[in-house]
Amino acid sequence: MEYRKLKNLGILLFFLQIIGIGIWFYVKQPDMEYSMDMLKIIPILFGINLLVGLVLYVLKKKDISKLIFGNSIICPLIFYAGWILWFTYYAQ
């Protein structure tokens, strides 16, 4: 895959994740008592992205699989940052 297309796909994926996680926080509005759920959600996000990357690697889509493997590290960090921001600024 061409580098420019891969870069654009990565940027699009990054923004879609931020929007999706933001919508999840807005709709779900978690309370402080659910803070232990974060320890369940982050490994699930990591595992799903890792599994998708592995499937794409097996299907010989190596460029996209590298992007998804990188995403498997970035996605839980975005979720963690959203979790901290939610309880620091928006939770009541």
Image (tube, helix red, strand yellow):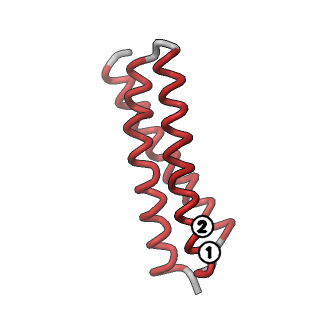
Q: Where residue 63 sits: x, y (%)?
A: 38, 21
Q: CA distance from mark 1 to mark 2?
A: 5 Å
Q: Residue at x 45, y 72 (%)?
A: 84
At label 1, the amino acid type is: Tyr
In the image, is residue 49 above or below residue 60?
A: below
Identify residue for label 1. 34
Q: Residue at x 46, y 12 (%)?
A: 60
Q: Where residue 21 sits: x, y (%)?
A: 55, 56
Numbered label tally: 2
Q: Where residue 52 sits: x, y (%)?
A: 54, 31
In this view, the residue in front, 39 or 84, is 39
Which quarter shows the N terminus?
top left
In the image, is residue 7 above or below residue 76?
A: above
Q: Residue at x 48, y 29 (%)?
A: 53
Which quarter shows the C terminus?
bottom right
Identify residue for label 2. 37
- How crowded pointer 1 is (Cα within 10 Å; few <14, some 14-19, many 20+) is rated as few
In the image, is residue 26 above or below residue 31?
A: above
Q: Residue furthest left?
A: 3
- How crowded pointer 2 is (Cα within 10 Å; few <14, some 14-19, many 20+) is rated as few
Mark 2 lies on a secondary structure that is helix
Mark 1 lies on a secondary structure that is helix
Q: Residue furthest top?
A: 60
Q: Residue furthest bottom?
A: 92
Q: Where residue 13 sits: x, y (%)?
A: 47, 39
Q: Quadrant of residue 51?
A: top right
Looking at the image, do the residues carrying marks 1 and 2 touch, with CB atoms under 8 Å apart? yes
Return the mark for residue 48. Answer: none
Q: Residue at x 44, y 44 (%)?
A: 14
At label 2, the amino acid type is: Asp
